[in-house]
Amino acid sequence: MSGITKQTSLKSSPCASESDPPSIPKRRQELLKWNGWGYKDSKFIVNKDNHVEFTGERYQLSGHTLTLLRDWMIATIGISLDHKTPPQSEITAKDMPPPVRNEEFLADMRRTNISHTDDCQDRLFRAHGHTLAEIFTLREGRFKRIPDLVIWPINHNEVVKVVELACKHNVCLIPFGGGTSVSGALECPANENRMIASLDLSQMNKILWVDEKNLVAHAEAGIIGQDLERLLAKKGFCTGHEPDSMEFSSLGGWVATRASGMKKNIYGNIEDLVVHIKFVTPQGTMEKSCQVPRMSSGLDIHHFILGSEGTLGVVTEVTLKIRPVPECKRYGSIVFPNFEKGVACLREIARQKCAPASIRLMDNEQFQFGHALKPEAKSMYTNFMDGLKKFYITRIKGFDVHKMAVATLLFEGAKKDVDAQEKRVYEIAANFGGLAGGADNGERGYMLTFAIAYIRDLGFEYYVVAESFETSVPWDRCLDLCTNVKDRLHRECKERGIQFPPYITCRVTQTYDAGACVYFYFGFNYRGVQNPVQMYEDIEACARDEILANGGSISHHHGVGKMRKPWLRKTVGDVGLGAMRAIKEYIDPNNIFGNQNLMVGEPEDHHVNTVRNVVASKL
Amino acid sequence: MVSAFIFRRFSTNQIVRFYSVSHGVKTITHVNKTCCTLDFGCNVWRPVKILIPNNYHALNLSLCYSKMTDQSRNAWIIKDDPRLVSARQKDFFVDILDDRRHTSDLAWSLRQRDEPKYQYNKPRSPAEVKGHVLKSDRVKYAIEKTMEETGKSLEEVTKEAVYIVDEMAHNLRVGVIRCFAMVLVKVMKKLFERIYVNEEAIQNVRAMLKEYPILLMPSHRSYLDFLLMSYVFYHYDLPLPVIAAAMDFMGMKFFGWLLRNSGAFYIRRSFGDDQLYWAVFTEYVQTHICNGDSPVEFFVEGTRSRTQKSLPPRIGMLSASLEPYFKAQVPDIMVVPVSMSYDRVLEEKLYAYELLGVPKPKESASGVFKARSILSENYGNVHIFIGEPKSIRTYSIGQISRISHSISPRYIASLTFREQALIQKLSYDVLLQQIRNMAMSPWSIIAAVLLQNMDGISMKELLKEVDWLKRQASNLGAYIDWPVNESAEAVIRHNIFTHKNIATVTEDNVVELIAEDTSLTQNQDPLFTSAAQEMMVCLYRNQLLNVFVRVALIAIPINSCVQETMPLSELKAHYSLLEKLLSREFIFMPGDAEKDFDVALASLTHTCGVVVENDCVLVKKSINKYTTFFSQMFEPFLLGYWAMCRYLLSIEKGSHGKPLVKLPKTISKEAQVLSAQLIRDGHVKRKEILSLDMMSNSLQALYDLGAVHKEKREGTSYMYPNLVLLSKLTEDLCKFIDVPDLPRTTINVDTKTVTVNAKL
């Protein structure tokens, strides 16, 4: 039973950041929207001039009026400012299911001094991630099942204690990190009759030590991305792991979902960054005994943990690789005459292994959207320059505004390396008809990524349901997949009688040696539709079928959760699934980590039972 | 006091409507050959003279006014005759030749064409298509493999590939098309009275072309099929299809070039396991589909159906065309079945001789020119029905999972068994839809009646019979192209006149088949000359058989039953045996026998007086005109099959008691010799059984049933009978039809003599 050791008392000594208050308070709803994305102070609104404005002071876009956005929304998805769908007011205790109480567990909990609460708003906040269905429920409906208790352990040992008690009293635990899941992973199973406790790791947010000799840092799993980078930056380091959700998502969540960062070309994805993981399971703590760059020791236990989505246990501490903060950081962009050329160029860049820290290719629809997000020009000069640029690209170079695609670039490293890399990338791009499009456009492209999460809430206000989904695909199928999935979405919308043109767009967000990651945004105006969420989910399911038929994957980094369970067996096969279930059966035989993600731990599934029996007889 | 004029110009001739309101009377006048529309409203009538700018036609409106009579209804009627039915518009059909008879063909062929384009199409020239094929992964892979296997150099193999693609590729060019269109329209006008097209479907195809790649799958009963198809697409401003054509055309000097430049691409008839050829061919077809350059047209029957029934599907081309969907290279593919029905088939005589085994002349330019004499004849109407498109995506929902192709490169040809089965099913569906949408000419019905009255039939009797049969066909869902506004006799006379080489009306009003074609060469066996004549009639009756085949296969066992009652289970067994036996002859969806049987039995009990009680057919009550007629229609086939069985049974045994193996071709030929003898000796009347096609079909069916075995020797297939099964089958056949009493036959192949030994 190598690799799985009973927890021995390990004294962790916080070294950094002890004085810093946590970025996210225990009562998250004081800082964050309870029924939407991000900070309460930041949102898109339609102001008194009937223009869209982004509020707050946090972001570059904050306080700006986006003069083009309203018309874009009207023209593209057919919204009308006269047809609004404001959200319901706060859900109060009477609208929530009463907590299931396991009195013995609660009594034991009280004796431990570990912070916990059954406050209904705290419980509600941990009942969901950010899928369309979940947010829509917050705006329009109520949840059938929410956690019955929220627990805030402050260190590894407290987690061990909580898990022990949960095992002792048969309480279901659902780990909670940043709450940014988009796979339904945080949803409480409706058929769970036991008490459900949400294990909120947000208070475990310290960097415990930094080892500059080996360039690794050891942090608690609840630390969120922006804090991790900020604290490391004080010492001149970074991890370079920047998923789009890094403002809110946590280190433990990244590990549990196999997250991917924007700059993985330099720093790698989470599986490349992780050196050591401390993982608390019902059987005890699982960890490797050494902190080495690589070893051959049978099946890699890290790979049970990466992507386990809270079904096997909870990540408490992680040792990550770190790098010195790069000397130089530069944005860039390339304009291509069309998406096909862009994909071909990205493929070539991947082939030559010279991809910058990040390279993303937006299709024309997204390029247009990015354009609509331009704040009003502050000066005549920028206006004039923009006009000139447009004239050059469309008139002199003959690009069609309705066909061209834009790649946004981010270079990082030593200045001379960045210079060289920049030169090489633009040279390759030129072979595919690409023109350098300036740093501003590049930067705006990355801004769009963060803005788009906020903008969905504006859509909700005007009868628009929207969501993103992603996949990974081999290079040779990349273009066909984009085309076919978009076509399928359009077709399904048409067949379902959606009256307004849907907004469907995609971008290639990551390049690999053997393929790419593709991201789709899909939204539609649901005026006249009975059950928009169901319809959205049905259509997205069709799109996922289409993705798989096109050689794409179930998910590149969002994970399976509950939403993508129907495709898991197709993806890993019967034996693969059986193996996953066998691991679950050993590590968590009583289904304490019972969030029912992936396809493990579902009580009603006969297959589980058979696998269980088989495993039981073998062990 | 004309208050307003609105002149609206039309590009070419249009029917012009103009409305003039005077004293509350609305006048709508249709004027041909003008080029503008006028709408004007005026309260008080005044003669107005309007000069129409396009072709200087002056209209004096007072003339229209003066035609008006007192009855107000007459004001909007041009020809006051309720029996006058437009021949231009007929049900869902519109005659597309009509316009061409009134205006310049030159202007028509040179006009601006507004073609819809596939949404993801990247325009490219035929030369670029060729370049793409040669550079494709699939062809590169095949070249590599070929090099490995043959040891040839890269250069040599590449050269081969270039040769193949050059030989194959079309060179669709607008200029050539326009010239060809102009010639073609003149030919069409000469040959045909009218070309009918179901226009509504055209709009559908137009919209679909923009969204998805299209496969056009017309029925194939004449060379004209693809010319007509292209003509229709040209007429409606649709992109011209590229057509998979057989090599034989390529040999023709000018015609081959012309077709190539009009979109035909040439495929060798058989290329077995030549993987380089396969790769080039597959890539060539698929690239057209993936890029949606043009609709891809091919004939699922593989070759022209000489018998005018339909041939069982060949799925090679269909598989190659649909693979891009299974490999997710395109979002969907639309399969459009098209039914082409001819009143009179251009190649009728050729077919008749071919079926009898007189080889057809090789297609050659001189042959085409000789066909000029054809131009002086009238071939009646053509009906082109564009069927309901089938989306392969919708068709395959729940049947297949495309995921299985995710783990290997898409250029390596591979289809799963389920996909192959689906394609097979689709091919049958397409054929059945083609059959369903055929327009049945009155002549087919007449032919069917004449064949059951070989000695002639009085016009009066014929009228009655034709009317009866027409009704039956119609009840079974056939579309019969029967003009409403003419008397039945006029229709029949007109049809006989169109086919005056086959039938004639004598002075005392008896309709007879013309026994012999005297114009043919003298050194032919007279039996075969007259058989050819009969065969031509059969071709037209054959068109009707598809309508009746299922009910007939039930009628035959009932009609030949000697018991009082027949349990349905027994009837079903008979049906399924007959269906298996005739499965090469007619199109049955594999696996649908049960369903077909139920539907056909329902039709028989519902409208044809077949009585079923307690799951038994009451035979006596059920034998009636319906069952008898239907049975008789199909008897020649059973007779032919019986002859084949008899022949096979007579094959001499070798030294080990096992019958000698023979080439399938030889077997058919020799069975024909036996049939000929039977006819000469007066045992059998129907000369139809001399058809070699029928013989080879029967041999194939017997092979499918296990009554004949196949043996491969040095790569060639030989066949020999399985005597036990065959005797059993022959006995079964004898139960269904009256056969001459032939206890023993001996055939001497060398001297081509058949001794029918009547002694026991």
Image (cartoon, rainbow, N blue to C red):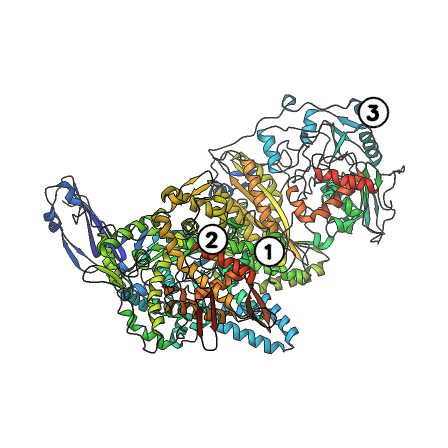
- Circle 2 sits on which residue? B429
Q: How crowded is mark 2: few (under 14 residues within 10 Å), some or many (20 or more)?
A: some
Q: Quadrant of the N terminus of chain A?
A: top right
Residue A56: x percent and y percent? Answer: 61, 36
Between disc 2 and disc 1, whose residue precedes?
1
Residue pictured at 78% horizontal, 22% vertical: A103
- Circle 3 sits on which residue? A108
In the rendered structure, the answer to whether residue B613 lies left or right of residue B522 reads right
Q: Nearer the viewer, residue B367 or A222?
A: B367
Q: Label 3 is found on which chain of the structure?
A: A
Q: Nearer the viewer, residue B473 or B31?
A: B473
- Circle 1 sits on which residue? B417
Residue pictured at 31% horizontal, 48% vertical: B471
Q: Label 1 is found on which chain of the structure?
A: B
Marks 1 and 3, how far apart at CA? 61 Å
The residue type indicated by label 1 comes to Phe
The residue type indicated by label 2 comes to Asp
Label 3 secondary element: helix
Q: Marks 2 and 1: CB-CB under 8 Å?
A: no
Do pointers 3 and 2 mark residues of a single chain? Answer: no
